[in-house]
Image (cartoon, grey):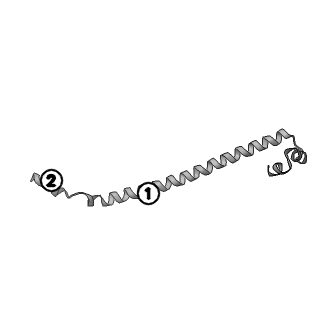
Amino acid sequence: MKLAKQIGVGKVVLQLGVHESQFYQWHKAFQQAQTVSEHETSLVMENARLKSELAEVQEETRHCKKGGYLLREAAEVNYGFMK
């Protein structure tokens, strides 16, 4: 592909001994592979971000469960008027 940009498609296909249509099919397949690769990369980055976010939420949830009793009054105080 780089060579085709430098010296032209016509010279490249002569050097390779293939038809010009075959060269363009290869070029199209190469571009599609690049697009898929970029998409996979973005999915991997999104997956890593989501895993990190999930870990943060799980950590917050764990802390809330452990310290939940600190944020509320004891049962005797809440229902002291019922005695």
- Assess disc 2: are there few (<14), some (14-19) or many (≥20) residues with their C-alpha within 10 Å of its C-alpha: few
Residue 63 in percent (x, y) is at 36, 60
Looking at the rendered structure, the secondary structure element under dot 2 is: loop
Residue under label 1: 56
Toward the top, the furthest residue is 21
**Mark toward the viewer: 1 or 2:** 1
Name, please, the residue furthest toward the left: 83
How far apart are the alpha carbons under marks 1 and 2? 36 Å
Disc count in the image? Answer: 2
Residue nearer the viewer, 45 or 75: 45
Q: Quadrant of the C terminus?
A: bottom left
Q: Is residue 51 left or right of residue 19?
A: left
Three-letter amino acid code at disc 1? Glu
**Element at label 1:** helix
On residue 38, which mark appears? none
State the image quarter where residue 71 is shown: bottom left
Q: At 80% from the left edge and 51% from the top edge, which residue is drawn?
A: 2
> In the image, what residue type sits under mark 2?
Tyr
Count residues near mark 1 (Cα–Cα under 10 Å), then give few for <14, some for 14-19, many for 20+. few
Give the x, y percent position of residue 27: 77, 44
Q: Which residue is mark 2?
A: 79
Residue at 41% across, 56% down:
58
Circle nearer the N terminus (1, 2): 1
1 and 2 marks in contact (CB < 8 Å): no
* Left or right of 21, for residue 75: left
**Image spot of residue 11 (x, y percent):** 89, 47
Q: Position of residue 39 (x, y in %)?
A: 62, 47
Task: Name which residue lies at 87% across and 47% down.
Answer: 12
Residue 19 relative to residue 77: left or right: right
